[in-house]
Amino acid sequence: MSMIPLIDVVVLAWFIACWAGYVVFARRKSGHTASLVVAMRVYRREWFRHMLGHENRIGDIGALNSLVTGSTFFASTSILILSGLVALLGTPERVIDIVDDIPFAHRDSELVWKIKIILLICVLAYAFFKFSWSIRQFNFCAVLIGAAPHTERPSEHEDFIATISSVASYASEDFNLGLRAFYFALAALAWFLHPALFVASSALVVGILYQREFHSNTLRALTRPSSIHQSLHLPESVLKELHLGARTA
């Protein structure tokens, strides 16, 4: 059996390091600075605080259903792509024939091609599990909305607000992890062409994710005018709790 070239081992290790490293970095950075994760945790908490005063909660359920729809779409897409990849795993020569026609494409053995396909299968399987778990957690939120008390004084139900906002945040963050997997799956496609392109695309995905989560216009809009604290008038203890939740989620 042919050996795996060292260059392919190195670029695969680089890909894993980029993905795992960014996950760890993003969680730690969200623990002490503004990010989309922390900002949305704050707004979810406010959403469910206001929900307790709604006698009719059809609108809240509708908003939750729209979130479930997004997770369902990507979970279904993951299954469809996985089906194609598993079928392709039995006939890798088709991919080899296609890529061989590209002038700058890197030539590899059939074993390496199978490893590339298996990598994509693993990435998409991870994405599917994250999206499907996200769907279940959003369903839990629907039950919690049904069980939510109706009150004009939400401060009397802080424990309930913390519970439902945490479950919704966990669901949303699992959706985010599944979406990241799609980004890295696109980077993994570059390996089919050339190892150097695979390295560059992995680094590019990390850069795109970092910019969007910590320096995007969306984040600046969510934290306007100057901070989440000032815009929503939340006490420092609540903000600390939300940052810690982002760190441990």
Image: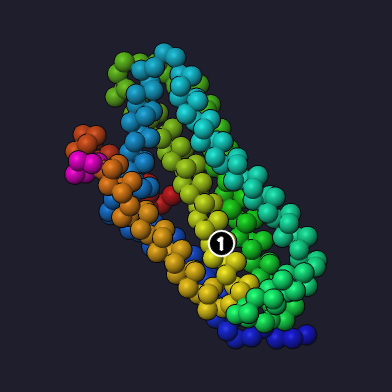
Which secondary structure class fits the magenta region best?
loop
- Left or right, 84 with reference to 243: right
Say few, some or many: other residues with alpha carbon within 10 Å of mark 1 (under 14 / 14 to 19 / 20 or more).
Answer: some
Point out residue 165 in the picture as x, y percentages from the top left corner. 41, 35
Residue drawn at x 70%, y 50% as measured from the top left: 80
Q: Which residues are magenta?
A: 224-229
The residue that appears at 58% across and 67% down in the rendered structure is 188
Would you say residue 226 sits in the magenta stretch?
A: yes
Q: Which residue is mark 1?
A: 186
Specify the color scheme: rainbow
Give the image location of residue 148, x and y in percent.
44, 22
Q: Is residue 110 magenta?
A: no
Label 1 sits on a secondary structure element that is helix
At which x and y percent is residue 208?
41, 60
- Residue 78, given in percent of the width and then of the height, sits at 64, 51
Q: Which residue lies most toward the top here?
A: 55
Quarter of the rendering containing residue 133? top right
**Relative to 13, residue 207 above or below:** above
Q: Amino acid at mark 1?
A: Leu
Q: Which residue is found at the position 67% from the left and 82% from the top?
A: 107
| Residue 144 appears in the picture as rendered | no
**Residue under the point 43% across and 64% down:** 206
- Please state which of residues 46 and 221 is positioned toward the viewer in this rendering: 221
Q: Is residue 154 above or below residue 116?
A: above
Residue 155 in sight: yes
